[in-house]
Image (spheres, rainbow, N blue to C red):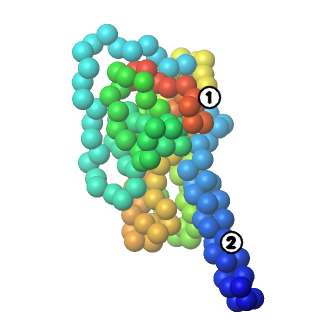
Amino acid sequence: MDRGDGRRIAAVVAVVAVLAVAAAVLLWPDGHHRAAPPPPAPSAPPSPSPSPSKQLPYPYFTPGTCLDHPQLSTVITRAEQRPCERPHDGEAIANVVLPEGLTSDLQIGRALRELCKDPLAAREAAQGGGGPYYGFPLGPYLQYYKDGMRDATCTMTASDRQGGQKLTGRLR
């Protein structure tokens, strides 16, 4: 292997590392928000969860939709809607729209956490204490943001890691 090959390999490794860090920052749950433990499963017959009203190339759910996410569940590779009456990672609590002018995945992640702060605080208060609960915003990577996609979902979860506690019913 000559010097050029070594430099190319080093450049590829550096790019992969930067992308991995950007993805982790954008998708890492916000650990500052804690509230009541998950409510018991409702006694009413199961009702279907709402489905997303928009088709986007990244996870997007309407409020009230229960879901599993691959950063919280080990058995899936993409975010998926789940029945709220069965164990699930989180519930969509609000939809938000990202502002114009963001130029990095890091800025998008920060904006998502800020936009989801108030809806998360309101839902935490409605749970009646206890905890912990976590904010877990879902939104576009920079690539999609640059293409004009600004819609995002604020979710609330009972865990901030894979294999952690699940919700067992709808949030209050």
Q: Quadrant of residue 92?
A: top left
Q: CA distance from mark 1 to mark 2?
A: 36 Å
Residue 120 or residue 5, whichever sits in front? 5
Asked if residue 6 is positioned above or below residue 46 in the image, the reply reads: below
The residue at the far top in this view is 43
Asked if residue 40 is positioned above or below residue 90 in the image, the reply reads: above
| Numbered circle sitting on residue 168 | none
The residue at the far front in this view is 1
Residue 88 or residue 75, whichever sits in front? 75
**Residue 24 placed where, x, y %?**
61, 53
Name which of mark 1 and mark 2 comes first in the sequence.
Answer: 2
Q: Quadrant of the N terminus?
A: bottom right
| Residue identifier under label 2 | 14
Secondary structure under the numbered disc 2 in the rendered image: helix
Residue 83 or residue 34, whichever sits in front? 83
Task: Using the rendered image of the protein, determine whether residue 50 is visible from the camera's viewpoint.
Answer: yes
Q: Amino acid at mark 2?
A: Ala
Q: Quadrant of the C terminus?
A: top left
Q: Quadrant of residue 25?
A: bottom right
| Numbered circle sitting on residue 34 | 1
The residue at the far right in this view is 3
Q: Amino acid at mark 1?
A: Arg
